[in-house]
Amino acid sequence: MSGKISRFIREYILVFSIVVLIVGFIIFLLSLTFFLFKDIQPDFIKNLGDWNYYLIVIGFILLATGIYYLYIYLKNRKFILEEIKTNKRSELLKKHAELKSTVRRMPSKYKSLLKEKEKELNIK
């Protein structure tokens, strides 16, 4: 069961990271208005009262988590695409182990790209 869940999350990590980033930003921004702008707060923020202390922490954690996963995804994607672009077998073999471990944590699209490149360059 956990394999199915992690596979599902791996396939849609870009969407999840963007959603978590947006939700974290909204929660963080709304709870920040409670502390900075006491005069122009909406009523629902005033009604939360002391919960705003927790919400600012939760919003910051969600914002940081979304930024982290988005950064990791984009960095790994860039690395994979740069390494697969090569047409030299020796260059691909130098980074093959690192490339395989990176592809393992990415959506299946990148795994199929690597398999095609390995087949093209006769790498086992």
Image (tube, rainbow, N blue to C red):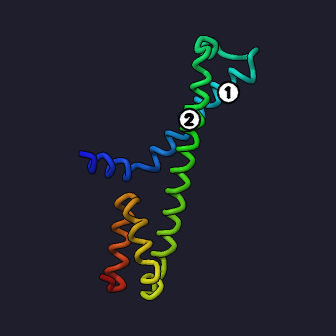
Q: Nearer the viewer, residue 3 or 12?
A: 3
Q: Is residue 23 left or right of residue 53?
A: left
Q: Nearer the viewer, residue 2 or 121?
A: 2
Q: Residues within 10 Å of mark 2 (few under 14, many from 20)?
A: many
The residue under the point 48% across, 85% down is 91
Q: Is residue 110 left or right of residue 38?
A: left
Q: Looking at the rendered structure, which numbered label has been put on residue 93? A: none
| Kind of element beneath mark 1 | helix
Residue 104 higher or lower than 43, as above or below: below
Q: Look at label 1 and name its amino acid.
A: Leu
Going from N to C along the chain, the mark reached first, 1 or 2, is 2
As measured in the structure, the alpha-carbon distance from the residue carrying label 1 to the one carrying label 2 is: 12 Å
Q: Is residue 123 left or right of residue 15?
A: left
| Kind of element beneath mark 2 | helix
Q: Looking at the rendered structure, which numbered label has been put on residue 32? A: 1
Q: Position of residue 92 (x, y in %)?
A: 44, 81
